[in-house]
Amino acid sequence: PMPRAAIVRSVPGTFADALAMEKPADPIDVQLAKQQHREYVQVLEGLGLQVIELAADDAFPDCPFVEDTAVVLGSRALITRPGAASRQGEEVPVKQALERLGLQTSQAQAPAQIDGGDVLFAGGMLFVGQSARTNVEGLQALASAFPDVRVVPVRVPRSLHLKTVLSCVASDVLAVEDSPEARAMFASIQREAPFLKSIAVSPAGAANTVLLGGGTVIYPSGYGRSFESVYEPYADRVIPVNISEFHKADGGLTCLSIFV
Ligand code: CIR
């Protein structure tokens, strides 16, 4: 079903200082990032979602990437303990917003580290990237928060997060980055869930899509090509959103919202 609300967080004036594995050749244009964020919010509103926009905090350059701060499943949420020390604290207003929406929350505690970007719900299971950001204690915190769901670890050798390289475009279809590492990650997912299929997507980063309500796919269009024809066979509706300035800080589309 379609979610009722989306939590997002505005772009801070300090966004150019957001973490990045590689410093972008072309620096982040903060004004453009703000405009792209507004356009994404308009797309969500246009789909009938209530958008809750949390105020930016200049002390947290990465705060627009709200996905990393909570994992929501049904009426419950795990509030994460983000894997990057500079991001710990971003979860506080997100927890409040989720509780105002009536969700029951629990909180990951040290030494657990977990970023929502490492968590993929697919085929009725939770796949959890084991990355530089998410450790085994983080995986255990997720398993305790959702005791009735199977939790499966997936090794993330190189990318920032699990969902940096793969995400759902339909309930049984994943877009998977066209690279040996991503294919190996998908293979380990498929061992647990053999009914899941994949479509290869390039370039790197383009496989991070948002699937809403079972048939609406929003994809990042800042990669110089259209993916309409790639996703249309699997979706009722395909919507491009350009988030080029967020890509520069290793962010994908899923990072920018939490759906409830
Ligand atoms: C970070 O390094 O934490 C941010 N610059 C990017 C976070 C991206 N989040 C995500 O993929 N869920």
Image (cartoon, rainbow, N blue to C red):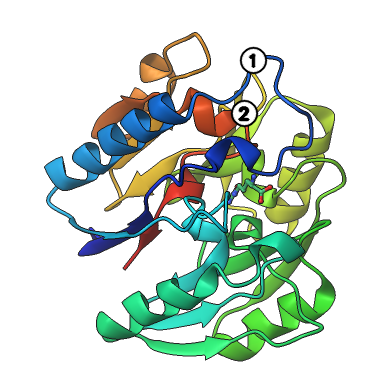
The answer to whether any part of residue 179 appears in the image is yes
Rounded to the nearest angstrom, the CA distance separating label 1 from label 2 is 8 Å
Which one is nearer the viewer's eye here, 37 or 12? 12
Which one is nearer the viewer's eye here, 83 or 137? 83
The part of the image, by quadrant, that contains residue 197 is top right
Q: Secondary structure at mark 1?
A: loop
| Left or right: 142 in relation to 4 | right
Closest to the camera, between mark 1 and mark 2, is 1
| Left or right: 233 in relation to 111 | left
Q: Quick one: label 2, few (<14), some, or many (20+) residues within 10 Å? A: many
Which one is nearer the viewer's eye here, 251 or 136? 251
Image position, residue 52 (x, y; %) = 25, 61
Image position, residue 39 (x, y; %) = 27, 32
Report the disc number at residue 248: 2
Q: Quick one: label 1, few (<14), some, or many (20+) residues within 10 Å? A: few
Q: Which residue is mark 1?
A: 26
Q: Secondary structure at mark 2?
A: loop
Quadrant of the image containing the C terminus: bottom left
Q: Residue at 56% x, 81% y: name it.
A: 149
Image position, residue 19 (x, y; %) = 70, 44
The part of the image, by quadrant, that contains residue 258 is bottom left
User: Contact, CB < 8 Å: mark 1 with mark 2?
Assistant: yes
- Depicted 192 relative to depicted 138: above or below: above
Which amino acid lies under the numbered mark 1 shown in the image of this protein?
A: Asp
Give the mark count: 2
Image position, residue 133 (x, y; %) = 77, 60
